[in-house]
Each structure stands twice: as C-alpha cells, then as structure tokens.
Amino acid sequence: MEHIFTINFLAIGRKKVFCKGGKNNINQYQLSDKINPLTIVGVILLFSVILTVGNQLQYLISLIFVLVLLLLFSPKKAFRTMCSLSVVWGIVHLLKPYLGNVLIGSIYTMLLIVLKFSPLFILGRVLSSYSSSHLMAAFRKVGIGGSIGIGITVFFRFIPEISIRMKEINNGMKIRGFRASIFKPLKTFELYFVPLMYKCIDISDTLTCSIISKGIEYDGKKTSFHEVKITFIDIAMLMGGIVLVGVSIWKIF
C-alpha cells in the first residue's frame, strides 16, 4: 500500500510539472497570436512616413514603441538592440568634432541614417519572429498569395537566418586566424561577403523547399494552424500609428 501511494504521489508530481511547463509554452506562443503580423506590416508602412517627415519627438516615440514591442517578443533581442543603438549613438557623438574630413563625414552620415530608420529595422526583427506558415496564413487572409506572399515571407525569414550565418562566418574566420579590421575594408568585405553570398543561396533553397513541402503549390483551399484575426491590440497599434502620421503631416503645413 505504501509503494502504491509513493508511485501515485510521484506520478501526480510529474503531472503537475508537465502541466506547468505546458502552460509556460502556451503563454510563450500567445503573444504572436494576439498581434496580427499584418499589423506589424501596416505599422512599418506608417512609421516609414513618420520617420521621413516627422520631427525628433515623433522619432523618439516611434523608437520607444518598437523597443517595447521587441522587448515583449524577445527580451534578449531587445537588450542587444539597445546596446547596439547606444554604441552607434556614442560613435556619432565622437565623430562630430571631425566632420571636416570627407571619410569621417561619410561614416557620420551613414550612421545617422541607420539611427534615423532604426525603428523600421527593429520592426523587421519583430516580424521575422513569426513563422513562415503564420505569415503565409496572414497574407492569404487578405488575398495576397502566390509569388508575392512567398517573396515577402522568404524575405523576412532571411533576417534571422543571415545573422546566424554571419556568426558562423565569424567563428570560421577566428579558427583560421583571420581578423576583420576597419583599416583593411576591402579585405574584410571580401572575407565576409563572398561566403555570405554562398550561404544566402543555400538559405533560399532551404526556405523554398520548406515552403513547398508545406503545400504552397496546392491549388485548393488552404488551412492553417494559426488563427489570423484582428484584435483590440491590432486596432490600437494601427490607430496610434495613424495619429502620429496625421500629426507629422499637419506640422509640415
């Protein structure tokens, strides 16, 4: 009797642990299900206008918004992004006294452009967090399918894949004793660009085969595991973006 009680107690304990872990996994996937990927695409289009014609205050509002959004999706990515932006911002301030030099002025301008449109890059990272099947289901919902939907999906799935391949190239260079240097830009560009091109071709083949294996070429009605719908969060995000666009355009006139 004692052995039976012990076995039952252990079984119940394992069941509780399993259920707890399952609950955490469900919560992990609920965030992307609550925000429609088409909403992220719409916000990218709206922020493109805001960052082009808006002032510094609207830029800061956009930047804070996208960082908070990325933080909700992936705290690790958000921390790395904030560190990268801080480094770029610091370099920009360090280069200000030396703008008389043509090379430094060009680097300064390039970094300013990166900072200016950094919210769009961050939104791209958020959109790349969605699976290819989720993106395709969202595009089919609004009638965007076929080659256009596949092209957009593959493009945004390229973003995380390229960062992974860049790490592989960097590790390979360290093993072989090669080091990147800003004083040898042509050699550094060659060491990174040539293997990256071959890896991009491999990535495109892999992603294409993955999408085809999921039945993208089937002509009948397609279904998806992901439920694509518009929620209150989607409406609030789009309305906020529309308000910022309206304020930006109103201040021009």
Image: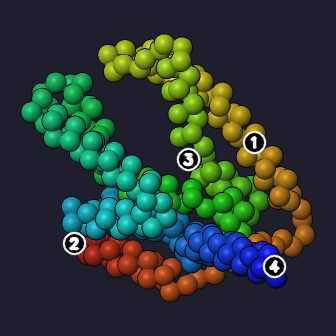
Q: CA distance from mark 3 to mark 2?
A: 35 Å
Which of the marked residues, 3 or 4, is nearer the chain's N terminus? 4
- At label 3, the amino acid type is Ile
Q: Is residue 199 above or below residue 17?
A: above
Tag nearer the camera, 3 or 4: 4
Q: Which mark is residue 251?
A: 2
- Most extreme residue toward the left is 97
Q: Are marks 1 and 4 in contact (CB under 8 Å)?
A: no
Which of the marked residues, 1 or 2, is nearer the chain's N terminus? 1
> Helix or strand or loop: what does disc 2 sit on?
helix
Label 3: few (<14), some or many (≥20) within 10 Å?
some
- Residue at 49% across, 64% down: 73
Tag nearer the camera, 3 or 2: 3
Looking at the image, which is closer to me, 28 or 140? 28
Q: Quadrant of residue 204?
A: top right
Which of the marked residues, 3 or 2, is nearer the chain's N terminus? 3
> Helix or strand or loop: what does disc 4 sit on?
helix
Picture coordinates of residue 210 (x, y %)?
78, 50
Q: Residue tagged by mark 1?
A: 206
Q: Is residue 26 visible?
A: no
- At label 2, the amino acid type is Lys
Q: Residue tagged by mark 3?
A: 159
Is 20 positioned to the left or the right of 237 in the image?
right
Q: CA distance from mark 4 to mark 2?
A: 76 Å
Which of the marked residues, 1 or 3, is nearer the chain's N terminus? 3
Picture coordinates of residue 134 (x, y %)?
68, 66
Q: CA distance from mark 1 to mark 4?
A: 52 Å
